[in-house]
Amino acid sequence: MAPLDVAPEYATECLLSAAPASVRAARSLVRRELSMWGAHDLVDDCVLIVSELVTNAIRHGGAACALRIRGGEGFVHGELFDPGAGTPRVRVRDMEATGGRGLQIVGSLADDWGVTHPAAGGKTVWFVLTLPGPFRRPPMFPVPRHSGE
């Protein structure tokens, strides 16, 4: 499946400053939006992936970044753009190291991921998470329950 070729049913995006508080803001946004979309089974993985990507962008790029999350029919496609140069790479770290595993986490959770370089500069790290079926949206309004009276 190529999620970019499918029109998303849902989308959200935001600009994030280069401050550590942006990581928490991005996690909250993703958790809230995916829950409203009914993508409950993807929330935790998507939150962790976004947290790692935003942290990397702030730590290594030091500039504001833009997050876009789109979804529909069992997939979530995320993109994080930052104006920094270079290509993020998975690094093989010493097993005793306490950091440097962000992209390994992304690679282990995402069904697919990669990096693109827009012509205008910067980079976009993207990822895809999939479910075998559609999202399970809760009803917009509570369903009345009758006591059988």
Image: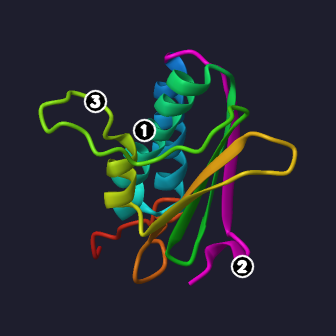
**Mark 3 against mark 1, which lies toward the viewer?**
3
Is label 1 in a helix, a strand or a loop?
helix
- Front in this rendered view, residue 146 or 20: 20
Is the N terminus in the top left, top right, bottom left or bottom right quadrant? bottom right
Mark toward the start of the polypeptide (3 vs 1): 1
Q: CA distance from mark 3 to mark 1?
A: 11 Å
Quadrant position of residue 87 = top right
- Please indicate, yes or no, whether residue 40 appears anywhere in the rendered image: no
- When the figure is inspected, residue 66 is found, relative to residue 117, above or below; the finding is above
Q: Residue at x 53, y 64 (%)?
A: 76
Q: CA distance from mark 3 to mark 2?
A: 35 Å
Residues marked 1 and 2 touching at CB (< 8 Å): no
Residue annotated with mark 3: 99
- Front in this rendered view, residue 91 or 81: 91
Kindly identify the amino acid type of the residue bearing the numbered disc 1.
Glu
User: Which residue range is magenta in the image?
Assistant: 1-20
In this rendering, would 147 be left or right of 33? Answer: left
Residue annotated with mark 1: 52
Residue annotated with mark 2: 5
Mark toward the start of the polypeptide (1 vs 2): 2
Q: Residue at x 45, y 63 (%)?
A: 39
**Mark 3 against mark 2, which lies toward the viewer?**
3
The x and y percentages for residue 9 are: 68, 69
Q: Which mark is residue 71?
A: none
Mark toward the start of the polypeptide (3 vs 2): 2
Kindly identify the amino acid type of the residue bearing the numbered disc 3.
Gly
